[in-house]
Amino acid sequence: MSTEVVPGAEPFFLQGGDTGVLMIHGFTGNPVSLRDWGRALARHNFTVCCPRLPGHGTTWEDLATRRGDEWIDEIDSALTTLRAKGGPVVLCALSFGGALAVHLAARRPHDVEGIVVVNPYVRDRRHVFVPFVRWFLRSVRGTRNDIKKALQDERAYPRVPLRAWSEAGRIMKRAETELPSIVAPFLLFHSPEDHIVPRGTAEWIFDRIGSVDKELVLLPDSYHVATLDNDAPTIFERSASFIERIVGT
């Protein structure tokens, strides 16, 4: 089993001003899907940190050996690093990264100034069956590159290890219960044509989130990995404006 990181899937840190942005990629994905977004935010003088979740950006066999607590510890450590600069920190997440962002904000509400999520994967009833099925199947075929724009590659895994998917389901279930406790300003980008996240999830999250300052922005020309899709410029521009507004710059 190789743990060598795929070229391009490395974590990245872009030094800027006092305002920090913690980026969280999705399940079976890696920082490739967030690199362009991170660079766009860095041009606004934000300090951008995107860790690589353990078991991601290597092989799916490596991911099968990981636990959800490792992913939580990784982003918790990154948040601590950004907070050490003394400025506010905003979470920006894609897909399952949205569940991790909600959980992190619920754990450390005073350290999170705002949350931006793109097609958050926080709810999936299929996870009820995963703890049982994983005793008979080690992995299932993955769905990757759900991107409308041609010639884009998120470099996600071709297979999904069910043990790790069970771990992801545990975090998602926790994030579901934590949504009402979130009070930080919240910006949600949603692709109506998303082949990964169950239909109605975005609206359900938006209605349940406890934030008073919240906005839902549609991405009509993108699929699930919208940060690499046709509506990416909308995400880059609107998220930068959102961050500047809530941090008062």
Image (tube, rainbow, N blue to C red):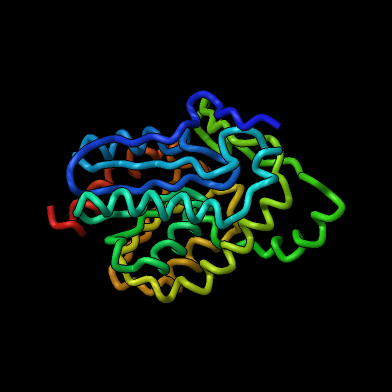
Q: Residue at x 35, y 53 (%)?
A: 79
Q: Is residue 27 visible?
A: yes
Q: Nearer the viewer, residue 198 or 134?
A: 134
Please state the horizontal and vertical placement of residue 129, each as a whole percent of the image: 77, 63
Please state the horizontal and vertical placement of residue 65, each as a whole percent of the image: 68, 46
Q: Residue furthest left?
A: 249
Q: Residue at x 50, y 68 (%)?
A: 204
Q: Is residue 229 visible?
A: no
Quadrant of res 184: bottom left
Q: Is residue 145 above or below residue 170?
A: above
Left or right? Give the position of 84 relative to 154: left
Please state the horizontal and vertical placement of residue 222, each as a whole percent of the image: 48, 41
Left or right? Give the position of 143 relative to 242: right
Count of marks overlaid on the render? 0
Q: Nearer the viewer, residue 44 or 194?
A: 44
Q: Residue at x 44, y 47 (%)?
A: 24
Q: Is residue 109 above or below residue 193?
A: below
Q: Is residue 166 above or below residue 178?
A: above
Please state the horizontal and vertical placement of residue 249, each as a whole percent of the image: 12, 52
Q: Residue furthest right?
A: 136
